[in-house]
Image (cartoon, rainbow, N blue to C red):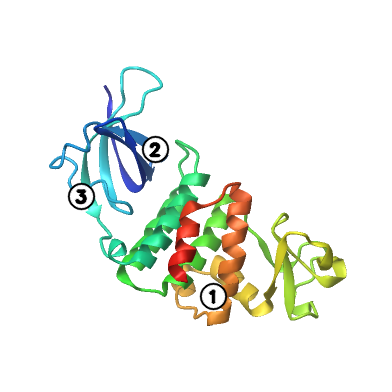
Amino acid sequence: MDPFSTDAILIRRTEYGDHDLIITYFTRRMGRLSVMAKNAKLSVKRFAGALDPFSVMKIHCTWPKRKNRLPILNNVDIKTAFARIRTNAVNTGYASYWLEMVNAWMEEGKQDHELYDLLLHVLDGLNGGKMDVQALSLLFQIRFMSISGFNPTLSCCGICETPIDNISQGRITFDFAEGQLICNTCGAGSIRHGITVSKGTLKQLFWINGSDIGRAERLKFSPEAIVEGQRLLEAFIPCHIGRDMKSLVVLRRLRH
């Protein structure tokens, strides 16, 4: 069996039989990758600390001789455990939501260095408390949408292309189906699945999406902008990924 190694972030684990686990990683080299951890429930020494969510590690695997079988996880080298995330229920809820987003969207074996680095960055920020967790989640979500190709149009009306500064109303309708703003002149009232968002919140989301990530982290959101940003992105993302997020249900309960 041919061996291989890669840096990886653990995003999911599933029980398989009495003793085995299927571990899903987001890897730098190979995108999303599922591997078989043989006897992982029994091998406390071999997999100690290696099966915790959010952990960053170097995994060492081998390809099986038979086709259509999962690679075998042999051992791991822990790089960063991000243990502080798991000591706080709300932080755990946010990190679990981010991982479910990645797992739901990523194709098996599709490499994406930009998304890998973004996920690593926000997990590090969450673990270190470098940024308010709700603002950090807005940063991750809006940049995730841009990387994944679902980038919403937030700077102008998606139909007439009037910049938001030139739109007369203070709150503008966002159309979830089309992923764009619709001004009143273009028929915002006819949108069946959407919400209205203030210009200030839209400008901040647009800015953190396009700015250097270091500068974006220093932007301060008002409590109202946090709530509006959450409502917008946490409804838009499941809509375009095409599935409900179980972790998002849990996160909302934890927040309230």
Q: Is residue 121 visible?
A: no
Q: Are marks 2 and 3 in contact (CB under 8 Å)?
A: no
Image spot of residue 98 (x, y percent): 45, 56
Taking the image as shown, residue 249 lies to the left or right of residue 62, namely right
Q: Which residue is mark 3?
A: 49
Q: Secondary structure at mark 3?
A: loop
Which amino acid is tagged 3?
Gly
Q: Which residue is mark 1?
A: 226
Q: Which residue is mark 2?
A: 33
Q: Residue at x 47, y 39 (%)?
A: 110
Image spot of residue 223 (x, y percent): 53, 81
Q: Residue at x 49, y 58 (%)?
A: 248
Image spot of residue 255 (x, y percent): 45, 70
Q: Residues within 10 Å of mark 3 (few under 14, many from 20)?
A: some
Give the mark, 3 or 1, whose residue is nearer the N terminus: 3
Q: Quadrant of residue 86?
A: bottom left
Tally the marks: 3
Q: Secondary structure at mark 1?
A: helix
